Amino acid sequence: MSAAKPVAILVSRAAAGGRLDRFIAGSLDVSRSEVQRWIDDGRVTVAGAPRGASSTVREGEQVCVAPAPPEATAAEPDADVRFDVLHVDDAIVVVVKPPGLVVHPARGHERGTLVNGLLARGFFARDVLDDGGGEGEGRARSYLRPGIVHRLDKGTSGVMVVARNAQAREFLKAQFQAHSIQRAYEAIVVGVAESQTFSTMHGRHPRDRLRFTSRVSQGKRAVTRVRVLAGLRGATHVECTLETGRTHQIRMHLAESGTPVLGDPLYGRSPSAPELRDLADRLGHQALHARLLGLIHPTSREFVRFEAPPPADFAEALAALFNRQ
């Protein structure tokens, strides 16, 4: 797997005075640990010279970054991972990820992920497993994300497409990068939401690296269209469609508009209404479901759509809020 092309970032007045690693992480939407690895490998220079992660960036300086490819890792098959398969053919597999399932191995989630389950079912062709991984001591090996072209947060359920071979992976990646994939989500939000379109900046939060915010001077464009489906007691059932697909985009936009997703542990807070608080506790995750995914098939070149209803806990929370009106 090759590294991304080098990129030059000019430090703006608003970003001046911040740490180098935070500036790069926010500008490129990567983790600070990944940036630290690049700095340690000599892949980052400021005004033509290496500089430490904690050094301060100044207005007008040019930061040059040569991103490294992701580190290879062994991902072991795990037949105990449970998920539903909506569709499978030679190019793609479409699954319904349940809430609570992590998509791919990462620090703190080395096993028991969707990728481990997909490996156990033999869904990946050799070419996506051998992108530099190959085999080791007779065990199946892969990168962290073989065939993964998009992801859903751990607490979010719904439809995902996974590439089964390298050609399909690159074809799907191009569609996601062009924002041509059709995606619709359902959510239960706390408060009275309105049908509206959010078109904002999107960047890593300056004080909390786990979160993202629209309140940044530099970042990427994020567009979410929200349509009210039904008013509930103290809450609203909404549909969200994406024009872009940034990390935590829907959760960020809904929370910053004052109507966070019910049960969101990162962007929300415990509702004041006892019935909502009880439902959030019973859910244990954000009430957000990726219901629809539409794309051009890598082989047939035809447009295909896949849909799945929300999981039982989402449906139960929705029914309870309808009944309380």
Image: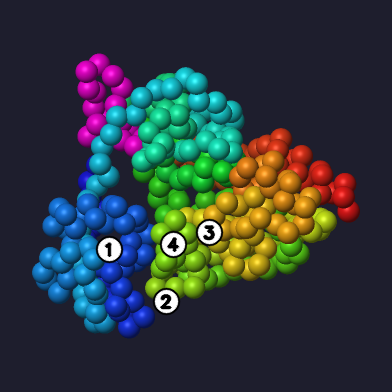
The answer to whether residue 186 is visible is: no
N-terminal label among 4 and 2:
4
Dots 4, 3 in contact, CB < 8 A: no
Dots 1, 4 in contact, CB < 8 A: no
Q: Which residue is mark 2?
A: 217
Which amino acid, by three-letter code, is at mark 2?
Answer: Ser
Q: Which residue is mark 4?
A: 208
Mark 2 → mark 1, Cα distance in angstroms: 17 Å
Label 2: element kind: loop
Q: Which residue is mark 3?
A: 249
* Residue visible at 74% across and 62% down in the picture: 191
Residue 172's disc number: none
Q: 10 Å neighbourhood of mark 3: few (<14), some, or many (≥20)?
A: many
Highlighted magenta segment, given as a residue range: 127-147
Q: Which residue is mark 1?
A: 21
Q: 2 and 188: which one is in front?
A: 188
